[in-house]
Amino acid sequence: MSRPVTAVTTIAAAAAILTGCAAATPAPTPDASSSVVASATPVAPTPAATTPPAETALVFPECEALVPLPLVRDVFAPTAVPWEPGEADRDQTEGRLGPIAQGTLQEADDVRLCQWIVEGGSDGGVSTFTSELRPSDRDDLMSALEQSMFDDVALDGATGFGMYSDGELSGSYTVHAFVGPTWLVALGSGGLEHGIPVAQAAVDALHAANPHLVDPAS
């Protein structure tokens, strides 16, 4: 008959079995790289910097488009023709402006002079200056004209100032018109009733070539 197994023997056997299992199967060593948890919130991509739109460049119509020849002939002389001004013509025309306007013209950008004379040449004519002004220069000139002998003149799409001057042989007009940053001067023989249509035609042409322009007084 076999001897009974005691409780001590049973416990020792169980301990040996558990110890053997532990030794045979070691616990896995944690991997440091695999234990890192990505806890940061994904960062949204930074929007690309946008370049502000460049200011629209001004377009100045050529002389024949600025003031149509039939209009010049109607308000000046039936035989009027376009004239290519030289340096002396330019100096003489600038000399008809007041000192403040002359100084402003010298600081203006893209100054263009158009002229029409009687075919064969004679005294008198029609001239226009077109240019671009800095806002401060434009405002200073407009303020000076308001405080001078110039009167307000009604122009569609522009702020206008006009003056008639008596001359030895005939009278002459000067009309200033402001459309956005553009400055137009119309000078010619006759009264304001002759100069205003010239200025208005030029204002209309500037608006047609630059639809973004607005009257600074609007």
Image: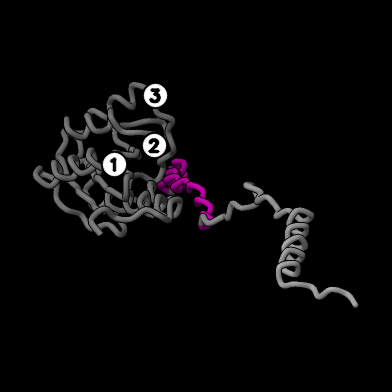
Determine contact: label 3, label 1, CB under 8 Å.
Answer: no
In the image: residue 157, left or right of residue 165 = right
Magenta part of the protein: which range? 41-67
Pointer 3 residue: 86
Report the residue that reaches farthest toward the right: 1
* Distance CA(mark 3)–CA(mark 1): 18 Å
Towards the viewer: 195 or 50 = 50
Q: On the picture, is 154 further left or further right than 151?
A: right
Image location of residue 214, percent across then percent down: 33, 55
Q: Which of these two is toward me, 208 or 35?
A: 35
Which residue is tagged 2? 114
Dot 3 or dot 1: first in sequence order is 3
- Residue 169 lies, in percent from the top left, at 19, 35
Kind of residue at disc 3 = Gly
- Residue that appears at 15% across and 43% down: 145
Circle 3/circle 2 CB separation < 8 Å: no
Q: In what element is the residue under mark 3?
A: loop
- Quick one: SS at disc 2? strand
Point out the residue furthest to the top here.
88
Mark toward the start of the polypeptide (3 vs 2): 3
The verdict on residue 57 being magenta is: yes
CA separation in Å, label 1 and label 2: 10 Å
> What x and y, as percent, mark residue 48?
51, 48
What number is the disc on residue 185? 1
- The front one of 19 and 73 is 19
Task: Residue 83 in the image: state x and y as whole percent.
Answer: 42, 33
